[in-house]
Image (cartoon, helix red, strand yellow):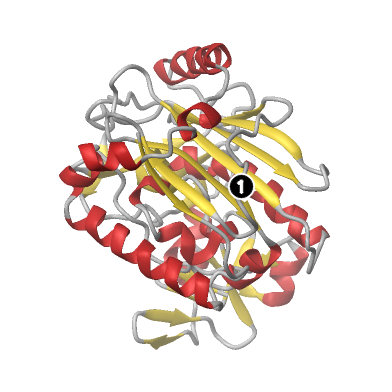
Amino acid sequence: MVHFYWLGGGLTGCGSSADSKTSEQNQDQSSSVMHKNKTAAHNSSASQSSSTNSSSAATQQRSTTTDASILKRLVSYTNKESAGPTQNYYWDNGRAHITGFSGMKAGSYHFSADSQGRSATAKAVLTYSEYKASQGSRQGDPLEPPAWPSSNPIVAINFSLTGRTYHGYLYNRSHSIADSLLGAKSYTSAYNFTTGTRPQNVGADQDGGMRAAEETAEGYWQDHPNSSQTIDYETTPLYQGSETMPRGSIVDIKSSDNVINKEFVVINSVEGIKVNYNTGSTNAKTTGTTSHGYGYHSSYRSSAASSSSTTTSQSTAGATKSGKWTVAPAGKVYVSDSKKYYTKVINPANYDCVTKSQAAAEGATQAIRGNQYAQP
């Protein structure tokens, strides 16, 4: 197993201390080598193996029996193309099983690969400063995880939970530890990413899948602003045999004051589409393909409201162009199907353009974070 440890230093995502700057320089070098030479990075060399902390493997191991039981459930759900017991691509699995955090300080993090070169356990000791620093926009571009599929089709996914249909990339370069929690540090290693289906990343309603776990940590920081507490956050992808894509992930979260002590199991599946977890190929009917898409392109519409919503979205008289962005008319905003509104977007047809007061009346709130398709 290949391990990458970065310890201590500044508590902010930008790393203001000298120790943090040195750490970031080393991270950049490691990430650059991995990104440019995936084959070398994904296959553990003798020198890498010999330098691995001998105690790490033991401290990282969760209960083999427990993981085998969880993997068995994940294989069952994914083989059935199921969204799982909550229909939202995750389930609550009780208390956290945190391992391998001895010696890790506030702001430190660790990404690793297994003997097959697949992304393995990712862990971090999260701080409020990192969360605060990451608000407003993404802190980097997602890295290509090991065995990223050669084709990323644009598909339609029908969700039983919401009755809505997603149109967009099937696969996301899915963070094990999110940008919203770890900031720029989350982009320092390809081993912090796995190939995840879109619903694995955000569920059926934008609050499921990996987002369910992430929002738990985000909610803690929102309830404890400027807190000196920390959160131990650990994500373990689970693979069936030698498959290159995980069937799902276990996410363990425990705050230092024990307010959060939870384990989530996230399902890397997609309703109505059969996935080959060795190659990433599927039986999906596609509307287009790309090998470069990050997976942010999306459009949620209920089948009943699709026509009227699109008409409303396109009725944006007074909108202006600013480079690639379409800026909403004065007093209006673009509302997504996740009930977040933005002032400028790339694809206005994917949103409802309404007055800000109307958006608020319908329960929409201003987005805190932007992405490459929409900005608050």
Residue occupying image coordinates x 48% and y 84%: 319
Q: Position of residue 15 (x, y in %)?
A: 53, 73
Q: Which residue does the numbered mark 1 point to in the structure image?
A: 103
Quarter occupied by residue 12: bottom right
Residue 256: in sight, yes or no?
Answer: yes
Check disc 1 and report its element: helix, strand or loop.
loop
Nearest the eye: 321 or 113: 113
Residue occupying image coordinates x 57% and y 18%: 63
In the image: residue 320, left or right of residue 29:
right
**Looking at the image, residue 240 lies above or below residue 305:** above
Residue 334: in sight, yes or no?
Answer: no
Residue kind at label 1, given as amino acid type: Gly
Nearest the eye: 42 or 356: 42
In the image: residue 17, left or right of residue 157:
right
Q: Position of residue 287 (x, y in %)?
A: 25, 45
**Looking at the image, residue 289 lies above or below residue 345:** above
Quarter occupied by residue 197: top left
**Looking at the image, residue 346 lies above or below residue 66:** below
